[in-house]
Image: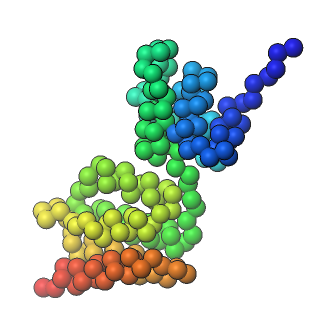
Amino acid sequence: MPQQQPCPTTLARHALERGATPAQAYALLARRTGQPLPSARAVCLALGIPHAEATHRLDDCHDALLTDPQPGSRPNSEADTGELLEALGVFDIPQPLDPTGQAVVDLFLVAIDAMGGIRPGHRHGLTRWFTTGNLTAAYLSLAAARPLPRTGDPARYWTALTTAGELLTTTPTPDTRIKLALTHCHTQATKATRP
């Protein structure tokens, strides 16, 4: 009687438990099975990403990355695809936000709107930080940016970031960089609201 193979999610979980990155776990599964999409889904599920969210993320990149490749068409392409999936945030583990964190993200969205335009790469990075709960990185990134001169609303932008920074400093151990960025945002908000 042939031995039954473990399910892909179990294999992915074992690879992750042994220290593999999500990209490495994907490459291992994709090479073993020759099925890119189920391999990516298995890694997402092993990371605890809900099935519906995993499906949504994979639908966004399926045609470009996960269509069935020709066997042997590109050696080690599974590793490249795994790294790209990781860079795109497909394997990002969502972190629930408390009410303060959600209020901070809402203020970030106000600031992004007040920028008057944002580069796609910057937006992608911010979205990943929102998903993973890395609000410090998002705040520092927005504080280092500025609204566009013609289409942005500097007063709204800097005021939203000042309020967000004030909320972030109420956490038990705020990053010292937040306090410095908050001072910068407050100064910019004062300048922007002067007649």
Residue 48 is left or right of residue 74, and the answer is right
Examine the rendered structure and indicate whether residue 89 appears above or below residue 75.
Answer: below
Q: State the residue lying farthest toward the right.
A: 1
Q: How many marks?
A: 0
Q: Is residue 52 above or below residue 114?
A: above
Pick the quarter of the image with the C terminus. bottom left
Can you give x and y, in whole percent of width and height, for residue 157 in the image? 27, 71
Q: How is the image coloured?
A: rainbow
Residue lying at 45% horizontally and 76% vertically, measured from the top left: 175
Residue drawn at point x = 49 percent, y = 36 percent: 82
Q: Nearer the viewer, residue 115 or 121?
A: 121
The residue shown at (37%, 50%) is: 124
The residue that appears at 17% across and 62% down in the rendered structure is 148
Q: Please tell me which residue lies in front, 127 or 160.
A: 127
Q: Is residue 113 left or right of residue 43?
A: left
x, y percentage for residue 57?
Answer: 50, 40
Viewer-nearest residue: 34 or 131: 34
Q: Is residue 27 visible?
A: yes
Please indicate whether residue 7 sits to the left or right of residue 31 in the image.
right
Residue 68, how many percent across, how many down? 50, 19
Quadrant in the rendering for residue 16: top right
Q: Position of residue 30 (x, y in %)?
A: 56, 27
| Image quadrant in which the N terminus is located | top right
